[in-house]
Amino acid sequence: MPTERFQFTGEGGHQLAAALELPDGEPLAYALFAHCFTCGKDTLAAKRISVALAARRIAVLRFDFTGLGSSEGDFANSTFSSNVADLVHAADHLRTTRKAPSILIGHSLGGAAILATAGKIPEAKAIVTIAAPSDPAHVTGLFREHVDAIRAQGEVEVSLAGRPFRIKREFLDDIVEHELIKDVTGLHKALLVMHSPVDDTVGIDNATRIFVAAKHPKSFVSLDHADHLLTRPADALYAADVITAWASRYVDAAKPATTTDSSEAPRRVIVQETRKSKFNQIISVGPHRLVADEPVAAGGEDAGPGPYDFLLAGLGACTSMTMRLYADRKSLPLDRVTVTLKHSKIYARDCEECETKEGMLDQIERDIAMEGALDADQRKRLMEIADKCPVHRTLTSEIRIVTKAVG
């Protein structure tokens, strides 16, 4: 997936460094992402969520606020109001060059900025906050021991996350003027509040205040066990999955370009590395997007099923579908099928019915549970039908795989 890097003009005429994560095909929607206080566009949470959303065909613009990262300007001269203005300029840039963002996402203080900005971007329909404070002034708690000195001296250097930043009196004066809860009450847009109950930087009570103040439609999702910065890849990927599913109800997503095989069966399956971790892959099957990974024990991050998990899922789904088709055709009282599968390696010598007698063999154990008022003969026949599913036949017959380099 391509990343387009460029600059646009922000508040005060400064050139702000931006990155636009684009999907391989036509985007279904555009999103604007606001990072946390003193962070940057390439922090783990901002980058991972943006890349994951792009893999789900949502293009995401993230950028460094004035004086941060690669953007021009002096951070000491920035305020919460200037951050809001930078977000409006970013939306203007997207509107001019691509399409205005219909999704706004903000992390930490960036979430507060997104709430304050939402009313200034008419095309925005879905608003997402992640670990956001209900009052922008909450951020002053990060340097509370310096607040009096800042007010007395006008400007003081403070250490935040091990880095020096100069904070001015103007920043304090500006941030206390914002009544964010009023912005939330008058939002009139769909809102998703995401927060970890164990966040020790911005407490979960902030999410409660935002959620209670908001009008419907509103949703809350708990980011269980996540830290404030979403440093675990699995937490960022989970957030992206939830945002994608939730926002689809509210944005006018563009229809994906139709390909010659989009309605044909079988459809092409495309698997591509995301480069977010060692094994992470994005799988595209027509309009569907899936994530594949390996378990932690195998060197992955367990962000999705592994290759053999998908293999077993294919066999299990095919088994259940085939049994359902037969039961419906024969009017059998089959209420539900549950297929449980397991893959393992066994010694060939332990398999009496196998032709191979040396080395190791792959073994798939398939347990089938059938619910319904079925008699013994019906159950027996359905078990026979299970072995006739197309995927079962493929796996137990000679398979020819043709591999070629295409680039």
Image: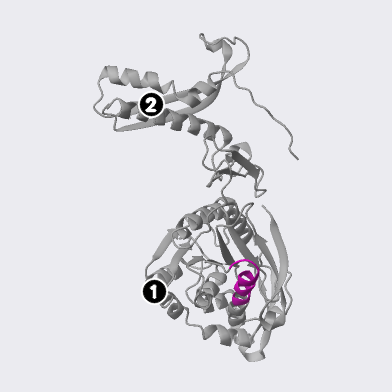
Residue reaching furthest right? 407
Q: Amino acid at mark 2?
A: Ile
- 271 versus 4 height, above or below: above
Image x and y of residue 308, in percent: 56, 32
Q: Would residue 68 be visible to someone looking at this image?
A: yes
Q: Is residue 198 left or right of residue 398?
A: left
Q: Amino acid at mark 1?
A: Ala
Residue at image point 52% right, 26% down: 343
Image x and y of residue 111, in percent: 53, 70
Q: Which residue is tagged 1?
A: 213
Q: Are marks 1 and 2 in contact (CB under 8 Å)?
A: no
Q: Nearer the viewer, residue 229 or 49?
A: 49
The answer to whether residue 87 is magenta is no
Eye-nearest disc, 1 or 2:
2
Residue at image point 40% right, 30% down: 320
Image x and y of residue 233, in percent: 59, 52
- Identify the element where label 1 is drawn: helix
Q: Nearer the viewer, residue 177 or 205?
A: 177
**Chief secondary structure of the magenta span?**
helix
Q: Would residue 42 be visible to someone looking at this image?
A: no
Residue at image point 56% right, 50% down: 234
Q: Which residue is tagged 2?
A: 368
- 384 versus 230 height, above or below: above
| Few, some or many residues within 10 Å of mark 1 (<14, 14–19, 20+) | some
Residue reaching furthest front? 260
Magenta residues, start to end: 88-99
Q: Nearer the viewer, residue 164 or 59?
A: 59
- Identify the element where label 2 is drawn: strand
Q: CA distance from mark 1 to mark 2?
A: 49 Å
Residue at image point 44% right, 78% down: 181
Res 144 label: none
| Few, some or many residues within 10 Å of mark 2 (<14, 14–19, 20+) | some
